[in-house]
Image: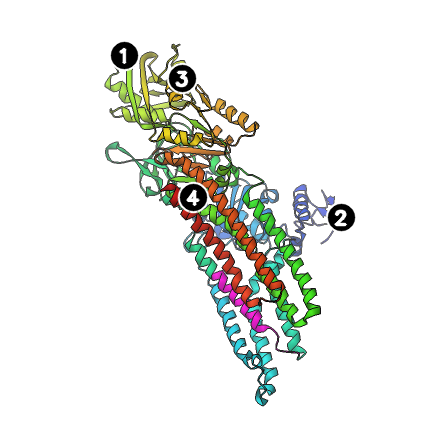
Amino acid sequence: MSKDNCYHCGLDCNTDRIEFDEKSFCCNGCRTVYEILNVHELTGYYDLESAPGTVPNDIKGKFDYLNNQDIASKLIEFDDLETAVANFYVPTIHCSSCIWVLENLHKLNSGVKIALVNFPKKEVRITFRKSEISLQQVVELIASIGYEPYISLDNADIHEKKIDRKLIYQVAVAGFAFGNIMMLSFPEYFQMDEYWLNRFKPFFRGLMFLLALPALLYSGRDYLTSAYKGLKHGILNIDVPISLGILVLFLRSTYEIISNAGQGYFDSMTGLIFFLLLGKVFQQKTYGFLSFERDYKSYFPIAVTRIIADQKEENISVHEIEQGNRLLIRNEEIIPVDCILINGDAMIDYSFVTGESIPVSKKSGDKLFAGGKQTSGAIEIEAIQSVKSSYLTQLWSKDVFKKTDSKDIKSLTDSISKQFTIVILSIALISGVYWYFIDKSAAFQVVSAILIIACPCALALSAPFALGNMIRIFGKEKFYLKNTSVIEAMSKIDSLVFDKTGTITSNRKAEISFQGEKLEEKELSMIKTLLRSSNHPLSRMLYHHIKQKEQGKLSNFKEITSQGIQGDIDGLSIVLGAASLVGIVEKKSLDTVIHVRIDKEIKGKFIFKNAYRKGLTNTIHSLEQSYRVSVLSGDNEGEKVSLQSQFPNMDELLFNQKPEDKLDYIQSNQENGNKIMMLGDGLNDAGALAQSNVGVAVSEDINVFSPACDAILDAHSFELLPDFLKLTHKTMGVIKVSFVISFLYNIIGLLFAVSGNLSPIIAAILMPISSISVVLFATISTNILAKKILQ
């Protein structure tokens, strides 16, 4: 490229030339992109064409159709006019370097805010600023660096993938080659000395060579390609030893045929590829059958309020939402489905979706997107589609909210798998040299068998399947976990902290009475109207206690954490909450109360007599055997004596705790080395849930979903908490046993291979069987343990 042109984008840079690394750049942006790629040894990007910073000619105009708003709207998951989110299926994602490049798109174009890669599904989720970059430009950007997304407009679903029959075809080709080569090899197997056989022997060997080529180049291509790409980026993956085994057999066999030294090992090579692929098919079928993919529709214990005829309300599970349903979204609730705003003042916080925490104002008729949180009272919405399976789950599982532990099982297995290949290659080299001097013909068989039989797959799969199956089991018992790492975190817990209201108490069984000036029907109706907007457990209890219908139009709604709620209804100011909020000084009370002030007049107070959850006493006593147990409550000390008499061994029982007090309590305990599980209502305890090692939101037919929590426990399963914790320890035990089985398999297999008593074909049969057996052990063991403990 000319010195007068930018090395990155090809534009003229005579005026403001920036010299770096003996190259010219037109701006700091182009230089930065070059630095990023250079540091990660990805400058091969510049070999693609002379001006890679511009849109390559082969894709120029290819994505112009994305400027059509109707088409773009079908591909975009979220769009608030300023920020948009799109999810793309990118088939070419194959290694850690791909992840690095895609997740650093914001350095290539500042219009990209966040890019997150889902490696197993080969998907990238991109959040971008519409004022700086369009959907078309986003697609052109990732296509220009070699990651063109697969976009299917036939069904407007970019996640829809055609059934991949390639593996079946590869098995068929390898099987055809293997069978025919075996047939052509029979005369030499039995050392037949016959004139016509000897005469046509070179012809038969040539046929074997020709049959072996498609088996190698088509059926075995994926192994060879994966090994090459891994080595290219400095990664020794499991396909490296397998590919070496295949190539050793092919090259040795080709040499023997060309030199007329023998028929070679084409039968072993094609048989090896055939059984490897057959094992892969069987693995896919087995893993599909044992699939622990979290079923959002079955296991997500979250409810939403649906408005039916005559303004009646009913609680339904989110997966029951249908297009056209009218829903009530209260203050601080998550919107579960794309919808149209029908009624109310909407201030939507989309930080759950985009990372931007500034609420966006919406008016009646505006479209709202799933994942937004209403922050200004209650609104009524109309669903414009049914709930997308796993959409909220995908948001919840985003790395933004992930709590990582460098000593977790995944990092351990990754480390072992990485070293595993180096050890196996060393053993193969030493054994090959040894056998070369003992028996040259056996050396190739031994090396191939070693490279194939030793496989870290069983080791790598045991943890995901044991943890994944336990997630599925917990889900069936209405204990829903964010991801598999939560199980491991739970197994390390030594302290449990409970919130009181709505966590250890039941919202449905509380006794409520009123003390003070008798309230008129209209006043009760207006109080209910105000309560309708709040999602606090006490608000929900009082809302259902008042039998009158709502009356009046609510405005200026405000919810003050740990204090109460207030708003204006038909010109009257109504305040419900603590004594300090309504403006009075009350003597220390032992009851949980909500004071009422209407139009500056104190009317009295609602008194709550809490009912504790079923089995609470046995649950706490069971937990106290193994854990430090504490209760933190924002209420007064009215029930302290009662709780102390029930749970004399409880470590701490603290009242009048504000959200920041709970957060400080957890932080101080963590600084002392404690691993904390916090159980709260998911909204008021969001800070404490986020700070804890494991945060659990307890749900009782209300929308308490919060990104801060690691798990959601249906209130009906509360008494199973000790069993859930016990199962996490048992699951980690199963994983350790699986590791032992995997190591034993590899050691025994290597002993047979090194001693020359294992053929490559048998090794190819045993390799997938080992993985399947470990997966079956992990899955069946966790099923048996769950059945035994949860019965």
User: Residue under circle 2?
Assistant: 22
User: Residue under circle 3?
Assistant: 637
Query: Which image quadrant: the N terminus?
Result: bottom right
Dot label at residue 365: none
- Is residue 503 rendered to the left or right of residue 416? left
Q: Residue visible at 55% across and 57% down?
A: 745
Count of labels shown? 4
Q: Nearer the viewer, mark 1 or mark 2?
A: 1
- Is residue 147 rendered to the left or right of residue 361? right
Q: Neighbour class for label 1 at 10 Å: few (<14), some, many (≥20)?
A: few
User: Residue under circle 4?
Assistant: 391
Q: Residue visible at 44% across and 37% down?
A: 725
Q: Is residue 280 magenta?
A: yes
**First of labels 1, 4 by sequence position:** 4
> How far apart are the alpha carbons under marks 1 and 4?
49 Å
Query: Which image quadrant: the C terminus?
Result: top left
User: Residue under circle 1?
Assistant: 517
243 or 424, nearer to the observer: 424
Magenta residues, as a range? 261-281
Q: Nearer the viewer, mark 3 or mark 2?
A: 3
- Is residue 190 rendered to the left or right of residue 551? right
Q: Is residue 729 magenta?
A: no
> How far apart are the alpha carbons under marks 2 and 4?
48 Å
> Is the magenta region chiefly helix, strand or loop?
helix
